[in-house]
Image (tube, grey):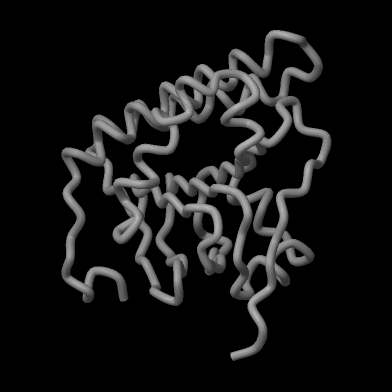
């Protein structure tokens, strides 16, 4: 195994500084996947939400199975790599501490709590009902991200993302991690 590359968050003209929401389909481009499919240590947080298809993702060299209705939370400074395939659909969110603290430092803990709570078992398996709600929240955030320049958009997106993370925290309590290693093959 070679050197593990450190990856910085790259702003690509996002509506909200330190926040990027993209679809798995848009992320799954050859030029992006060449580097994303290699082990790297990230300086930002990643949330992957799978709506269709199956696949896996590696966190700290452990392969985690993903299926529709799964959310994986990857903490910053962890080693991970994308093992996406072209049959998977869903969303990927990258965000930084800048995003957390710029608008509302008081509520940053609401966003980070699921990441801390699920550090060893970062996959949350959503119930069918919860999956519908998470999908709706993601599509609303996607629409806001596409709206362009508006001084209120960062606050709106931050608020929606905080709502999503509080809901995922609740779902995390209901979806106890399966500590059976075969679940992650």
Q: Position of residue 59 (x, y in %)?
A: 45, 67
Q: Residue at x 68, y 67 (%)?
A: 6
Q: Residue at x 60, y 66 (%)?
A: 41
Image vertical order of residue 185 relative to residue 124, above or below: below
Quadrant that contains the C terminus: bottom left
Q: Position of residue 158 (x, y in %)?
A: 56, 21
Q: Residue at x 31, y 61 (%)?
A: 120
Viewed as shown, does residue 153 lie left or right of 12?
left
Q: Position of residue 44 (x, y in %)?
A: 60, 49
In-front residue for pair 48/42: 42
Q: Position of residue 111 (x, y in %)?
A: 44, 32
Tag count: 0
In-front residue for pair 144/79: 79
The residue most toward the front is 106
Viewed as shown, does residue 162 lie left or right of 24?
left
Q: Residue at x 71, y 24 (%)?
A: 146
The quarter of the picture where residue 96 lies is: top right
């Amino acid at each position: 195994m070679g050197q593990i590359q450190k990856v910085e968050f790259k702003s690509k003209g996002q509506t909200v500084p330190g926040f990027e929401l993209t679809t798995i389909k848009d992320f799954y481009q050859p030029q992006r996947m060449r580097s994303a499919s290699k082990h790297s240590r990230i300086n930002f947080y990643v949330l992957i939400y799978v709506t269709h298809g199956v696949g896996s993702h590696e966190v700290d060299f452990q392969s985690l199975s993903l299926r529709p209705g799964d959310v994986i939370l990857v903490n910053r400074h962890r080693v991970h790599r994308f093992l996406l395939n072209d049959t998977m659909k869903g969303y990927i969110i990258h965000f930084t501490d800048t995003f957390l603290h710029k608008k509302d430092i008081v509520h940053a803990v609401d966003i980070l709590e699921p990441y801390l709570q699920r550090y060893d078992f970062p996959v949350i398996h959503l119930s069918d009902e919860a999956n519908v709600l998470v999908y709706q929240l993601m599509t609303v955030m996607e629409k806001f991200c596409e709206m362009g320049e508006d001084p209120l958009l960062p606050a709106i997106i931050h608020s929606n993302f905080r709502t999503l993370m509080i809901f995922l925290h609740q779902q995390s309590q209901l979806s106890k991690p399966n500590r059976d290693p075969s679940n992650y093959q």
